[in-house]
Structure formats: structure tokens, C-alpha cells
Amino acid sequence: MTDIDGTRGPGETLDVLGVGFGPSNLALALAVQEHNERSPESARVAAGFVEQQAAFGWHRGMLLEGATMQVSFLKDLVTMRDPTSPRSFLNYLQGQGRLADFINTKTMFPSRVEFHDYLEWCAADVRHLVSYGTRAVAVHPVTGPDGSVEELDVVLRDATGEGTRTVRTRNLVLATGLVPWLPPGVERSERIWHNSELLHRLRAVDADPSDPSGVSGAPRRFLVVGAGQSAAETTEHLHRRYPDSEVRSVFSRYGYSPADDTSFANRIFDPDAVDHFYEAPGDVKQMLMDYHANTNYSVVDPELIQSLYRLAYQEKVAGTQRLHVHGASRVAGMRDAGDDIDVDIEFLPTGERETVSSDVVVYATGYRPIDPTSMLGDVGGWCRRGDDGELLVERDYRITTTAPLRAGVYLQGPTEHTHGISSTLLSTTAVRAGEILASLELRRPAGITAVRTVPAAPVGS
């Protein structure tokens, strides 16, 4: 066996292997690191993580200038778990020499660019636990003398496709994230994008607008599909970045709907709300999701809605309208017209259609979870599902399994059906990491001593 960070020899076993290294498993790595720093060697947790990206990155394609977080900086990767942690956003600011400056902004919501820099700062602190450019491609059960499966062999492959190795672990934590979603029949192309790749695409076009592999000439006509925060941010960004452009926004609502960010509604994101949701009967779970969908799904910050409306109105007054908002509408068809795309926009109340030409169509249509058991092979057959086909998940985020599987398989992300609306968000990430770590410690077999891990790099290095 080969471990992640090189501190264990052949045949030794990890306590936990995390697959995917976005904010969720990064928070778990920080919790493990802090636990090990204050624990005797016999109580330390042997952990490793793999990430298919070459370096840490979180929604880099939407790090738009001026875009802010929709969650308080206090809901960083550690504070809700341990307010004294040296890996907090406030300690990051102190290390950057910006603490007083940030306080003077009088905001709870840092820019998305700054918060991403905080995440990278945290990731650098636990880089010894992570193997980047590595994919987990298969999981095999390790059957013990009594027929039980208390350990798993995970086959890892370099992102280049060359070379594999195997890691043995007692527990898996799957945090493989979400994948961009496009409506049925729509495929990405040089002119049809998902907003997740927005900045990468725009930089390529700006760098060489004559590149024949991309959009021919600087784009002057954009069409954005979607009604949520990302769609509105994309619309505003394109309008500002290309002052000679025409930008159209198409969505089926009559107008952008405001996000409910009020104090009482925000209780749905409290750690206690996870307990309430988990214990609630199915009909109550659905009721809560329906009531509070407007805190997160297909909604926009009121300030951004007002800003876009002012833009559209001011352009009408000036008689030079560049921003067109097609509410209560849908894209009814698209055709490649050579140098552009012809898009049919249907106004839903009347069925009336108009055809517009666009250089680029950007779909800001969200993300969907992938089946977390898709890589588990035979192990996935021991993961229990409910009558609705959803995985059964324990309160500690461990999938309910059947014999002979005793090794733990934990989920970070696709647990909305059991743990509530905060499952895919940052709000409870720090607390969830602590709960998973506590579960791992409780489930450690008697007599197992953790193997010493590489000491932490200095915070801020």
C-alpha cells in the first residue's frame, strides 16, 4: 500500500481517506490537523485526501470582480466548530495585515476573491495531507477472516492517466461536489457556455479574439439563461466588462426573485436546524424545503436586482438600450448560424416568439449532484437506499450500510434529503467537519494507534 503523504510504510492503513478537496473536505482536513496538534501520538487520526485538480480551486470561473459572498465570514471553515482556531478568516486577515481595514468596511460579507484567497491559505496549511492531480477510480472491499469488511482499498490514478497506486483506509469521506447542469438537448460548445467556465472563456477570447478555435472576433452580443444569483451576476459582469455589448437575460419568472436573507429565515442554516430537519418526518422535511427554497435557489440579492433594473431603465431613458431582460420567457430553440447563434425566445403568457442573434449563450442553470456511490463498485451494493431511491444517511453523515460492510462511508454534500438545505452550502461546513471527525474517533477499532503525520506547516506560510 502507498499512503498520501509518505509518512506510513507498506501495509499500513489510514483512518480516513477523503475523496475531493473542496471546502468541505478542506474543513475536515483542518479539523484533523488541529486534533492531531493537540493530541498524543496514540490518539492522532491518520488522514489523507485526493483531489483531481492540480491545485486547490473553488468556482474559479465565477470569481467576478465585485462579487461578494452570500454567507457571513464567521461561517468560515473553522469558527463555528472552534472560535479559537488559528485557521479562522479573522486570523487570515491579521496575517495579511488587513484586519483593521476589513473591520472598517462594516460588512459581514467579504468579496468572493478574498474568501477564495482565504481558502487557498487554509489549503496551503494542510498541503501535506493532500495528493493533487489524483483521482480515485475504484474501491475494493478488504474481507477479514470473519467475512466482515472493515477496510477498503482505494485505487488512485494520476490525472495524466499514467500510474496507479492503492491506499487502504478504514473510512471514506466522499466530497466530490456538484457538476454543472444544462437543460436536456443543450451541449457546450465554443459559443454555448456554462457560467462555471465564464472567466476562463472570457480570458481566452480577450487574449486572442481572432483565435479560430474560439469566438471569432470580440463578442458583442450575449444571452444569459437563468434566474438565480449566478445568472444575475453573469449578466451584470458582461454588461460592465463589454461596454459596447448587448446583453439579454432570459428566465421563466416574471422578474428576478429576491433572496430571503432575513434573520428568522436564516435560522434554517443554523447547526441546530440540521438536528431538527434530520429528526422531522418526511412531509415536514418537504414543507421546510418548500418554504425556505427562496433562501438559496433561483433567487438574487435585492441590491443586485435593483442595480440591474436601474441599468435597464437608465438605458431606456437614454434611448441606447444594451440590457434586455426577457421575463416570463424561455429559450424555445437555438440554431448555429455560422458566425453566431440564432435563439428563439418565447414569451410564455402569450406564446409569442422572437428570434435574436447572439455571439455567445451562457447557461447559468445551476449544478446537480453526482451519484456518490458511482465509484464504489461492489461496496455500493451494501449502501442502503430508501423507497425513493435516495441513500439512507446517519446523523453523523455516514451512509447506512448492510453486512458485511463495517468500514464507514461518509458523505459531504448530497445530503439535503436527510440533513437539510445547508448540506451543499458553507453555513454548517465547519460544524459538520467536527461531527465527522468525532464519529471517526468513536468508530476507531479498539487497540488501533494512529500513525504520526507530518507536522503542520506554519499558519500563513
Image (tube, helix red, strand yellow):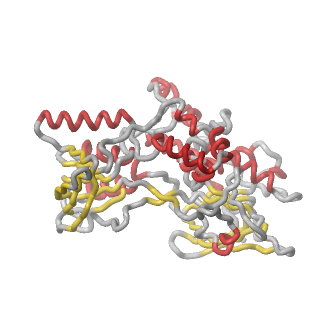
| 320 lies left or right of 281 | left
Residue 89 lies in what quarter of the image? top right
In x, y percent, where is residue 296? 47, 43
- Residue plotted at (39% across, 44% down): 229
| 352 lies left or right of 236 | left
**Is 159 situated above or below 130?**
below
| 408 lies left or right of 26 | right
- Residue plotted at (42% across, 54% down): 366
Residue 198 shows up from this direction: yes
**Is 300 situated above or below 226?**
above
- Residue plotted at (57% across, 66% down): 134
311 vs 241, nearest the viewer: 311
- Residue plotted at (79% across, 57% down): 451
Residue 189 lies in what quarter of the image? bottom left
| 35 lies left or right of 283 | right
Total number of numbered labels? 0
In x, y percent, where is residue 358? 20, 57
Residue 18 shows up from this direction: no
In x, y percent, where is residue 122? 58, 45
Question: Could you tell me which quadrant the C terminus lies in?
Answer: top right
Question: Could you tell me which quadrant the N terminus lies in?
Answer: bottom right
In x, y percent, where is residue 210? 20, 62
